[in-house]
Image: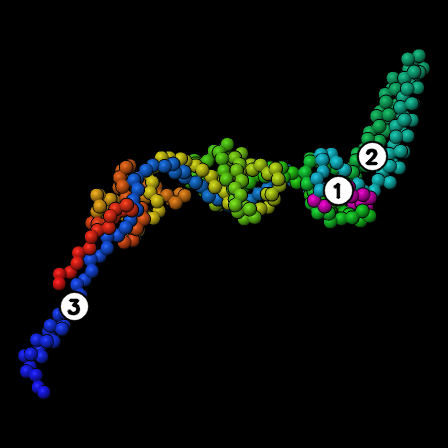
Amino acid sequence: MRFPFPLVFTVLCLAGCGGEKAPQPRAVPLVEAAPVTSRTFTDRLEAIGTALANEQVVLSAPVTDRITSINFADGGFVNKGQVIATLATGQQQAALAAAEAQALQAKQQLERIQSLQTRGFATASSLDQQLALANAARASADQVRASISDRVIRAPFAGWVSLRTVSPGAIVSAGTAIATVSDVSRIKLDFTIPETRLSSISAGQSIQAISAAWPDRPYNGTIATIDPVIDPATRAVRVRAILPNPDRTLKPGMLLTVSVASRQRQSLALPELAIVGDGEERFVFLLEGRKVKRVKVDTGIRQSGQVEILGGLQAGQTVVTEGVVKLTDGATVRLAGDKPAASSKPAG
């Protein structure tokens, strides 16, 4: 059975028209907004520092001789003046006995001549000669005592000693290290800064240091000294800070990240998510009613999730803080709590 062509064409057109769907309207984006407020921003100077002991000395053998005793434990604490080690003193003790005997004899002879001189039986020259002999004998004995004292090695200050590397009975030569004593009750932290930042630091200024060994624990201290001489090769100046170290967690030789708070100021601030980057420029979406306006802003430093606003906005203005990626200039938005816009239905 054949259908007339006009009838077929009409049916197809009606079928096609009935299958088309009207485009759905775009949903109004939901955003969050907040007023522009001010907060404190702090300029910080970052550097890398090396930890040094408050006091540290390497105790070495003054002469070549045999070690007779070691009086410290590995890593132990020693008091000021405590004997660390002793070297053999047998020959020196014998020499001291002989020197003391000569000094005693010279002293007794001097007393006899003094007695004779008061009675007129000794000349002044003989008295002077014997006095010189007595002084020489006493000086000789003192010299031997000093030699014996040099063979007794003592801690010059209280601190913690290093691991022991020598044993009693060993023959050591002059200059051989016996122990290292370190006072780590506080730490000297040395770091360098460029000469261009010299005006931003001063003695007594607070610093904060972080060690890789204790990343979650900041150490607070103060700048003690600024080197008066700038290194002409690096154009940097050396700074020394002092950090309390009562629990001895900081060790000499550690590298620490140093942060120095140099200047504080009050500035306008916005959350980082509110800032839109476009090349070198920065923008925000200013809320005006329920429409947004794209506004260029000048930004400063970032700190604790906030961005310093140097220009382009005023305190109290409301800015979109979340949802900026969905926005264009002049777009309509809705906030939490707004009723959703009624969607229009396509005509039938």
| Marks 3, 1: nearer the viewer | 3
- Residue 72: assigned label: 1
| Marks 3, 2: nearer the viewer | 3
- State which tag comes first along the sequence, 3 or 2: 3
The front one of 124 and 17 is 17
Task: Name which residue lies at 46% across and 35% down.
Answer: 201
> Pointer 1: residues within 10 angstroms few (<14), some, or many (20+)?
some
Instruction: Give SS at disc 3.
Output: loop
- State which tag comes first along the sequence, 3 or 1: 3
Give how far across and how far down residue 130 sits, in percent.
Answer: 88, 23
Task: Name which residue lies at 88% across and 28% down.
Answer: 103
Colour style of the rendered protein structure: rainbow
Q: Is residue 342 left or right of residue 187?
A: left
The residue wearing badge 2 is: 144
- State which tag comes first along the sequence, 2 or 1: 1
Marks 3 and 2, how far apart at CA: 117 Å
Q: Amino acid at mark 1?
A: Phe
Q: Amino acid at mark 3?
A: Glu
Mark 3 in CB contact with mark 1 (< 8 angstroms): no
Q: Using the rendered image of the protein, determine whether residue 216 is visible from the camera's viewpoint.
A: yes
- Quadrant in which residue 39 is drawn: top left
Instruction: Give SS at disc 1.
Output: loop
Q: Amino acid at mark 2?
A: Val
Q: Magenta segment, which residues?
A: 60-75
- Residue 20: assigned label: 3
The front one of 301 and 25 is 25
The front one of 334 and 151 is 334
